[in-house]
Amino acid sequence: MAAHDYAAATVLLEVLTPAYRQQAAPLALQLGQPRLAAAWTDQPLLQVAALLRLGEPAAALEVLREQGQSARPAALRARAVWQLQQQDARSLAEEARRRAQAEGDAAALVAVATLRGEQCLEDPFAALRALAEGLKIAELTGDPADAHLLAVLGHAQLRMGSGKGRRTAEKALERSLPASPARVLALLALDQPEEAMAQASSGELAAVWWRGFITSGSASGSEMGHTVVDG
């Protein structure tokens, strides 16, 4: 999305009348306006996605209580528990993976692969194995690889000392939406913490989205520590 298109669409959201807000909720999330999306939507999973952007996992889990155990709620539940740093986060991600495989839900498989890659990031080789499952889905469906997955992959490759890491991050940046977790992580991988900070602030992103991607003593960590609070 071009910068001027993003700005114009964001302005449009601000002037929408109540009659159109529910319909516009998915667009609000895409444009990095999760508070509006959460307030406007009547779709529980969209509301959960918005709450997770805001770093409100407990509220997200409350919404998910009524959403059953199918792949997409399971993937969101695993992400929420990961944000809360609970001990069963990895087992829930594995369970979501199994459900997505059983249901043949490509989107859920990619989301879970991305989450599992984040969970394994301290072991880059394990992260690569997890993320490879998401890349395989893109190959099978013929769709471009997911920007968020690519951003995490770029970080894993950089930790391995691979020259591919920067190229992967550049590709993630190119495919990412403004103010999205994918864009923030891609910018961090490209050592652009100030722009990452601006994107995170614009998208109302909680710092939990880049937890584990930077060290507290790094320049990036110092920059990002002054944006939005960890959920």
Image: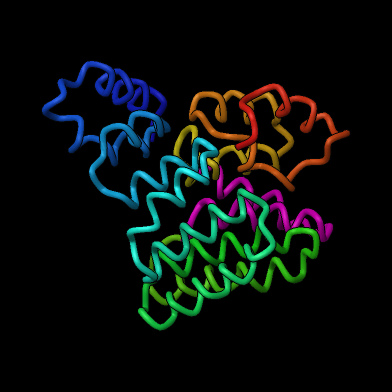
Predominant secondary structure in magenta?
helix
Q: Which quadrant would the C terminus be assigned to in this image?
A: top right
Give me the residue at 40% from left, 34% from top: 34
The vertical placement of 148 against 189, above or below, is below
The vertical placement of 127 against 159, above or below, is below
User: Position of 121 compared to 24: left or right?
Assistant: right
User: Position of 219 compared to 55: left or right?
Assistant: right
Give me the residue at 57% from left, 30% from top: 200
Q: Residues in magenta?
A: 145-174
The vertical placement of 110 against 84, above or below, is below
Is 158 covered by the magenta stretch? Answer: yes
Is 101 covered by the magenta stretch? Answer: no
* Place of residue 82 in the rendered image (x, y in percent of width and height, measured from the top left): 61, 55
* Place of residue 60 in the rendered image (x, y in percent of width and height, measured from the top left): 45, 47
User: Position of 46 compared to 84: left or right?
Assistant: left
Residue lying at the far bottom of the rendered structure = 102
* Place of residue 154 in the rendered image (x, y in percent of width and height, measured from the top left): 67, 54
178 and 174: which one is in front? 178
Residue lying at the far right of the rendered structure = 217
Q: Which quadrant would the N terminus be assigned to in this image?
A: top left
Give me the residue at 50% from left, 35% from top: 54
Tell me how many marks there are: 0
Give me the residue at 63% from left, 48% from top: 169
Query: In the rendered image, which quarter is residue 11 located in?
Result: top left
User: Position of 14 compared to 163: left or right?
Assistant: left
Q: How is the image coloured?
A: rainbow
14 and 182: which one is in front? 14
The vertical placement of 137 against 220, above or below, is below
Query: In the rendered image, which quarter is residue 22 located in?
Result: top left
